[in-house]
Image: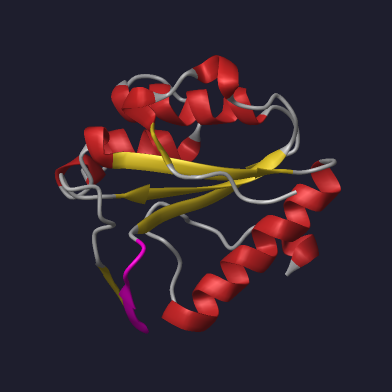
Amino acid sequence: MGWSDYKRFVDMNWGNNPKNPGVYYIRCVNNSGKPIRIARLGGVDKEGIVYIGETGRNLRNRLRNFWENAKNRRANRHRAGWNYSNLGYIKKFPLIYLEVCYMSCRDKEQTGRVEAENLREYRREFIDLPPLNFSAGREKYQ
């Protein structure tokens, strides 16, 4: 059980993504494929992480929901995707440069723990959350 390589959303073959629970990172790269640098309260995120998320059900569907909401301002199946398309994040993080990597998990319990742990690590280093995260994961795991 490890992390996948990063894949651009625009190049995604949805059928290749797992249908099981999982945790995922979304980042933004530049036109050369290098992560953009994002200034945070505690320093500069050199990996360009814009969101850390999880699903206790179907990773393929969750990633597709983010992508569809990021492209379509009217859809509302993924809060971070909706925020991205409706709150102006597209100006700083263009759709064609969004990438995702993920880790499959056994169940919802594991996804909650892994997401909370990754958000804690991010906050330890940068003080605040990635730009599209509006909470630090489920309270039960904090």
- Seen at 69% across and 27% down, the residue is 58
What colour scheme does the image use?
secondary structure
Relative image position of residue 82 (x, y in whole percent) = 39, 33
Q: Residue at x 84, y 49 (%)?
A: 109
* 127 displayed left or right of 21: left
Q: Is residue 64 magenta?
A: no
Relative image position of residue 84 (x, y in whole percent): 32, 40
**57 above or below 83?**
above
Q: Position of residue 136 (x, y in %)?
A: 59, 63
Residue 14 seen in the current view: yes
- Using the image as rendered, state which of residue 107 and residue 90 is in the foreground: 107
Outermost residue on the top side: it is 15
Identify the magenta region: 42-47
Side (left or right) of 7 relative to 60: left
Please determine whether, in this image, residue 25 is positioned above or below residue 117: above
Residue situated in front as seen by the camera: 80 or 64: 64
Please state which of residues 27 and 76 is positioned toward the viewer in this rendering.
27
* Residue at 32% from the left image edge and 69% from the top image edge: 46
| Quadrant in the picture for the C terminus | bottom right
- Residue at image coords 47%, 55%: 133
Residue 44: in magenta span: yes
Quadrant in the rendering for residue 57? top right
Query: Residue 41, can we see it?
Result: no
